Amino acid sequence: MKVIIRRPRREVEMPGSRRVRDLLQELKINPESVLVVRGDELLTPDELVKDEETVEVVPAISGGSDDEV
Amino acid sequence: MKCKTCPGKAVIDMRRHNAAFCKDCFIVHAERQVERTIESDKMLSKDDRVLVAVSGGKDSLTLWEVLRRLGYHTTGFHIVLGIDHYSPQARATVEAYAKKNSLPLIVTHVKEEYDFSIPELAQYTRRVPCSACGLSKRYLMNRAALEGSFSVLATGHNLDDAAATLLGNLLHWQTPQLGRMGPALEATHPKLVKTVKPLIRLTERETLAYAMLRGIDYHDDECPNAIGATSLFYKDLLNQLEHASPGAKQSFYFGFLKKGRPAFLSAQADGVELKECEVCGQATTTETCAYCRMMDLARRTATARGR
């Protein structure tokens, strides 16, 4: 499978199929800070991504100007 | 994974709620969370004229979308920060959203109207860019709300923003700031406008999911000045905690509001008397407000450097 990771953008080829939670663990990405998307579809951690598919890891976290919240 | 409320297939899991939702049920859940926040903290009424601060990112456009759908009278307010490549795209995103939804929008350009872009301000005042940006935004948002006679200013801060700010304020024992933290701050001076943060019960991951599922065309680029920002480091730390202990961020922030903040309210009030800035007339605790002092320093430094 191909995994596209944004910020900074990079592509990772991972052989075989695996569940979303496993691919994030292998890539050492905290699932609390991202969403995993296949096309327009958001994927839950139990979803199986097949070898021939492409998924994108979209970062949820943005930072910037300090503020009183 | 199945949706918690219907037989549909889930698209997002939320471990802090021990739940997962399909697209439609998640959208309903997120909008209800915002609606309940607005009601429980008495943030807005349907009579209010609400100025919504919109950067063009997922959080601010999610806020505008939800407030619009809930039937509030909103006007967008966008600040063009003058950051190469980033600012033009952000502005175009906001203008496209406003046009698509026939919503009024006010745009302020810091370079054109106040002489300095945010990177220039940072350079001439030797502040980190995020500090110059935060101070400018707070000042310009309040000023725009006053000048436009808006009753409330709404910002898209989410639970991750709030928890990260709380962590930073605690680490440095910023007691007056700890007293001021809260999802709704009433106007305590005629030159201050009430500010509210209706997304405070949604995590950043949830606002991202909402924006994606609603098909909001948000500006996805990270501000180049935010790379390495302390707030990102704090958010990462808190998400590590959240991963190990779901609900940690919520417990940290809302627990503080309930049990910790009252202890700091006096620190906020002690010796603080708000008056009008002798330069611009905005509310301040000193003779000249922090924004005018920053701008004065920038002008003097720029002149000294022959600009």
Image (tube, coloured by chain):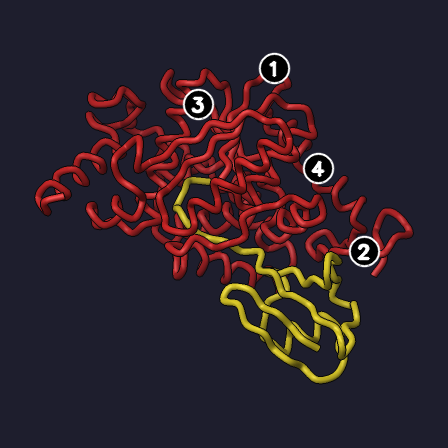
Q: Position of residue B294 (x, y in %)?
A: 22, 38
User: Which residue type carries mark 3?
Assistant: Ala
Gap in Å between the C-alphas at discs 4 and 2?
17 Å
Residue at the location (62% across, 19% down)? B45
- Upstream in sequence: badge 3 or badge 1: 1
Q: Chain of mark 1?
A: B
Gap in Å between the C-alphas at discs 1 and 2?
37 Å
Whether residue B293 is visible here, answered yes or no, is yes
Q: Colour of chain B?
A: red
Q: Colour of chain A?
A: yellow
Q: Position of residue B201 (x, y in %)?
A: 62, 42
The quarter holding residue B35 reads top right
User: Which residue type carries mark 1?
Assistant: Asp
Give the class, few, some or many, for how many residues have Cα within 10 Å of label 3's Cα (few <14, many ≥20): many
> Do residues under tags 4 and 2 come within 8 Å of each other at their CB atoms?
no
- Upstream in sequence: badge 1 or badge 4: 4
Label 1 element class = loop
User: Which residue type carries mark 4?
Assistant: Glu
Name the residue that disc number 2 marks: B10
- As rendered, which of A40 and B66 lies closer to the eye? A40
Quarter of the figure with the C terminus of chain B:
top left
Name the residue that disc number 1 marks: B47
Name the residue that disc number 3 marks: B145
User: Which residue type carries mark 2?
Assistant: Ala
- As rendered, which of B110 and B264 lies closer to the eye? B110
Label 2 element class = loop
> Do residues under tags 1 and 4 come within 8 Å of each other at their CB atoms?
no
